[in-house]
Image (cartoon, grey):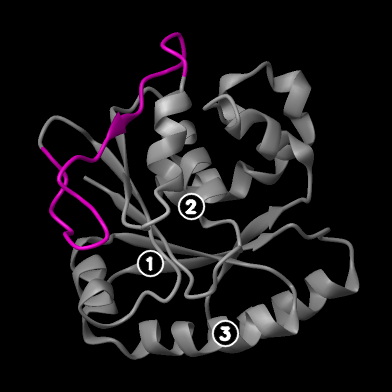
Amino acid sequence: MPVVVVANPKGGVGKSTLSTNIAGYYASQGHPVILGDTDRQESARLWLGLRPPAARPIGAWDGISSDVISRPPKGTTHAVLDTPAGLHGWRLNDVLKLADKIIVPLQPSVFDIFATRSFLDQLAEHRRAEGVQIGIVGMRVDARTKAAEQLHHFVDSLGFPVLGYVRDTQNYIHLAAHGLTLFDVAPGRVARDLEQWQEIGTWLNA
């Protein structure tokens, strides 16, 4: 079972947005998927409560919280884990034990880059990170801008792949308010955003 962890020690970078849409992506592929939330704010768990019955099912990863990180239950094939800001210590160790893939959302600001640099260095050096695939997703950024170029240069210096860029759009906000993702609505309505997810989806399925 692939377990995808979305992590960044800095708050407000879009971890829950990314987590919920990854779960939505897997559900759209027909996979039995669960979504876990170890953040005390429980944004992903609250989002699950908003999800309409008619939408493709995404299960809750029960038995997991900010203080307890347990293995995914049987009966699902894919799992996504949303994590809190400041992930470190035993929580990071437990997450790395579970993770097959770690996606780090990163905004193109000097503060986010500095905060995330230390975390990525820690991941690279961590013993249990061996064999775990790590990728970066640029959040709220236009791939054609200088900021995106600088972000790409920064990530290249660390040796991690940039999986794609997620643009700054109200689509994510409006859909999240109804417990939905890009993959729950007519493709023509979110065509630009789905295009940005093509490479991310390829990496998730690899």
Query: Where is mark 3, residue-wise?
Result: 115
Span shown in magenta: 52-73
Q: Residue at x 74, y 28 (%)?
A: 190
Which quarter of the picture shows residue 192?
Answer: top right
* First of labels 3, 2 by sequence position: 3
Look at the image and say whether residue 53 sits in the magenta stretch: yes
* First of labels 1, 3 by sequence position: 3
- The residues bearing labels 3 and 2 have C-alpha atoms spaced at a distance of 25 Å
Q: Amino acid at mark 3?
A: Ala
Query: Where is mark 2, residue-wise?
Result: 203
Question: Is disc 1 in contact with disc 3, using a CB cutoff of under 8 Å?
Answer: no
- The residues bearing labels 1 and 3 have C-alpha atoms spaced at a distance of 20 Å
Q: Residue at x 19, y 40 (%)?
A: 62
Residue 130 shows in this picture: no
Q: Residue furthest front?
A: 41
Above or below, 161 against 100 in this view is below
Q: Amino acid at mark 1?
A: Gln
Q: Residue at x 38, y 60 (%)?
A: 83
- Tell us which disc is closer to us: 1 or 3: 3
Look at the image and say whether residue 182 sits in the magenta stretch: no
> In the image, residue 199 lies at what x, y percent?
60, 49
Question: Is disc 1 in contact with disc 2, using a CB cutoff of under 8 Å?
Answer: yes
* First of labels 1, 2 by sequence position: 1
Pointer 1: residues within 10 angstroms few (<14), some, or many (20+)? some
